[in-house]
Amino acid sequence: MQAPVLVLKDSLKRESGNKVHHGNIQASKAVAEIIRTTLGPRSMLKMLLDAAGGIVVTNDGNAILRELDLAHPAAKSMIELSRTQDEEVGDGTTSVIVLAGEMLHVAEAFIEKNYHPTVICRAYNKALEDAIAVLDKIAMTVDVKDRATMLGLVKSCIGTKFTSQFGDLIADLAIDATTTVGVDLGQGLREVDIKKYIKIEKVPGGQLEDSKVLKGVMFNKDVVAPGKMRRKILNPRIILLDCPLEYKKGENQTNAELLREEDWSVLLKMEEEYIENLCVQILKFKPDLVITEKGLSDLACHYFSKAGVSAIRRLRKTDNNRIAKACGAIIVNRPDELQESDVGTGAGLFEVKKIGDEFFAFIVECKDPKACTVLLRGASKDLLNEVERNLQDAMSVARNIIKNPKLVPGGGATELTVSAMLKQKSSSIEGIEKWPYEAAAIAFEAIPRTLAQNCGVNVIRTMTALQGKHANGENTWIGIDGNTGEIADMKERKIWDSYSVKAQAFKTAIEAACMLLRIDDIVSGIKKKQAPGAGQAPSKPKIEEEGDADNEQMIPE
């Protein structure tokens, strides 16, 4: 009898085969369960305590999962899913997780019957291709210019969110903001950069109804010398700078030895002249408003207020970019390079208002703003955060439609159609792959089923009625009205989903399910090389080779 061979260290834990598959599926299902109740208009909210003790109240799938701290590797990869969905298309974060969880759930039966995971994956990928094809078939194009359609669309996408009780408010804000900053790239393509050019300013106080999209930008700053400078300017000429208007300080500790008393005054005079020159160069262009990202010395401030120019200093770079986009100015790095074309004249009004207990500067009524600020008012901070998250989603949806103006029915109708089509197709598939393919078709029904569950209707009855309606691939627009739970035509109820969101959700969910199914071995407990003294320390002293020299162990805590 041979001695047993030890390959892995004792401290390592290795699970393989079926155990892993079951573990992964359980973990993913657990994640999906957490999120499941937040799907649809009748969704519940989740309250999370984060590490700092702050509270997050939300039903945005991604926001919930972001706060969770998970131990299981498979569950972590589920979280990645909702994050990619959020980054790619901004909506549908919940449905991705529910779908992926369901895909894995139906795969479990096959693994117990000793199907090989690759077979299941192959079937799933086939199902995915066909599902996307079905999507293409039922998608309808929409006119981006038509305000009413867009409103209905964005509304149905945030109907699942907390703010849906404020009706069209958020949808209006989102559409205004995205149509404002859309840039035509030619060939009928539009690029909407939400992150860069739409700023959301949350100001606690007031009512939600006071929220609005400004035709321009606002930022949390006051003019430098409030008493002397004008706080309201009509049609201002705006100059944006990226350089300090103060005397340059010497590089770290410069010593200057002055032998004569007069030299000192000459030095000071030079500093003053330098600043005066800067100001003269700027004032040549007769601006009404000078904004700089860096400092602005008292002296420069004096020159400006003498000339009747308002100045604002230390503005964030991102804000400065937005102002440039809004009023058509160009940010200048050195005052001596100013040209007439750099002056922004697009704004209609500059004024400083006090909201709550802070001053905000508004640059509004711009002619053709390419950037905007959404001003959110609300009672509490938690409320504002949630509204902001919903607005993010709504804007992403509006952006997706502007980029790819195709719609599919919402309310689970799309998934049911896909499911019915796949069921039909599955009969023509040969060999062993037929069963997992059919299972994938059934998995798509998770979304309408969850919708029905969250409305509190009789799930089984509703589902069978829906499946009957969809059976031969007809009635593609029949789905569940998430508010009442009754079966209705989505076209009439104006419940839509953006094509790009759905396609992305299907792809992400199925690919992730395949990835998790392919894992058949988990080796955990891999430790970093232990420092001597920890654990079973070797008796001989440890000699550093050059290889380890840049290890962390060298640095004493």
Image (tube, rainbow, N blue to C red):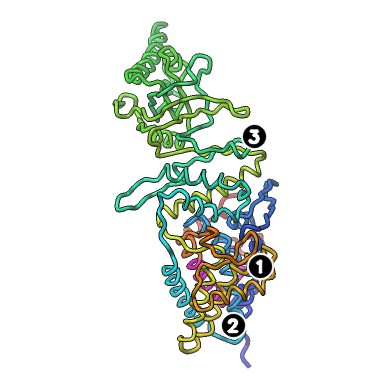
* Camera-side mark, 3 or 2: 3
Give the class, few, some or many, for how many residues have Cα within 10 Å of label 1's Cα (few <14, many ≥20). Answer: some
- Image coords of residue 141 (percent x, y): 40, 60
What quarter of the picture does the N terminus occupy?
Answer: bottom right
Q: Are marks 3 and 2 in contact (CB under 8 Å)?
A: no
* Camera-side mark, 1 or 3: 3
519 in magenta: yes
Magenta-colored span? 506-530
428 in magenta: no
Find the distance from the CA under tag 2 to the CA under tag 1: 19 Å
* Kind of residue sitting beneath label 3: Gly
* Kind of residue sitting beneath label 2: Ile
Q: Which residue is mark 3?
A: 205
Q: Is there any visible trace of residue 3 in the rendered image?
A: yes
> Vertically, is 533 above or below 471?
above
Q: Which residue is mark 2?
A: 111
- Image coords of residue 299 (percent x, y): 45, 15
Earlier-in-chain disc, 2 versus 1: 1
Q: Are marks 2 and 1 in contact (CB under 8 Å)?
A: no
Secondary-structure class at tag 2:
helix
Secondary-structure class at tag 1:
helix
- Image coords of residue 221 (percent x, y): 52, 28
Q: Which residue is mark 1?
A: 30
> Vertically, is 534 above or below 276?
below
> Vertically, is 325 above or below 295?
below
Q: Pick whichever, 408 or 59, lies toward us.
A: 408
- Which residue is painted at 61% across and 50% down in the image? 164
Find the distance from the CA under tag 1 to the CA under tag 3: 39 Å
Find the distance from the CA under tag 3 to the CA under tag 2: 56 Å
